[in-house]
Image (cartoon, rainbow, N blue to C red):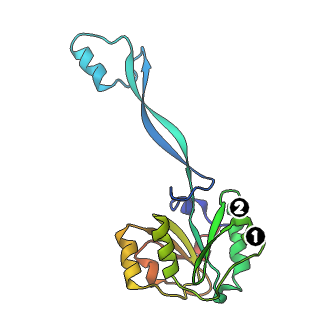
Amino acid sequence: MGLKRALLDRFTTRQKVDRFRRMVTHPRIGVSPIPIRPSKRDFVLLAAGMPPLHFHNHALRVTPQERGLAVYLDVSGSVNQHLPEIIGLLRSLRTELKTIYLFSNKVVEVPFRTLFAGRIETTYGTDFNCIAQHIFANRLDKAVILTDGYASMTEENQQQLKACAFRALTVLFGGRSDSPEFEALGDVVRLDEVTV
């Protein structure tokens, strides 16, 4: 069992590099004696009565692009009983994710294998403002936030996140079904809705 990959792929970001790959198409020009998809230049030459020796055909090239997934995991005291289940679900991402962000009253970046080893750094409190400050400092445009939702964020940080067009997927576990702090920033779903 794990998190739905198709949903997570929508929240990958260029600001953090993991092993997530996204296929990107780039236009390119290929030269050939056969007019498959001629360029404007070729049409102009043909209209002028001067057939080109080689046609500059439009083509698309598909290349992989390295992407990352910024995952913020709530490790406050109120989520201790849920952490084994959450870490088990994250196990499906172990080949792609290099690091994960743990948050309580501060954000700590840890290697993904450290999380699986059970070494968790926490202050036992919960504060969404530390996530906002970390997002601003790292210029993230997207993130996945796993939390029980029992915390708050200042109105100023919420407005700044909206202003910089930040998008979040907030995954709630442990009873709550809403998170007013993150609703304006993207989808807020329950954990059972995003597991396969």
Quadrant of the image for the C terminus? bottom right
Count neighbours of disc 1 (C-alpha within 10 A) and say few if under 14, some if 14 to 19, many if 20 or more. some
Q: Quadrant of residue 165?
A: bottom left
Dot 2 and dot 1 residues touching (CB under 8 Å) = yes
Q: Secondary structure at mark 1?
A: helix
Q: Nearer the viewer, residue 3 or 76?
A: 76
Identify whether 130 is placed above or below 13.
Answer: below
Residue at the spot 39% in from the left edge and 24% down from the top edge: 57
On screen, residue 87 versus residue 41, left or right, reads right
Q: Nearer the viewer, residue 47 or 73?
A: 73
| Residue 155 pos. (x, y %) | 38, 84
Q: Amino acid at mark 2?
A: Arg
The residue wearing badge 1 is 116
The residue wearing badge 2 is 94
Residue at the spot 49% in from the left edge and 35% down from the top edge: 61
Q: Amino acid at mark 1?
A: Phe
| Residue 66 pos. (x, y %) | 57, 50
- The mark that comes first in sequence, 2 or 1, is 2
State whether residue 104 appears in this view: yes
| Residue 44 pos. (x, y %) | 24, 20
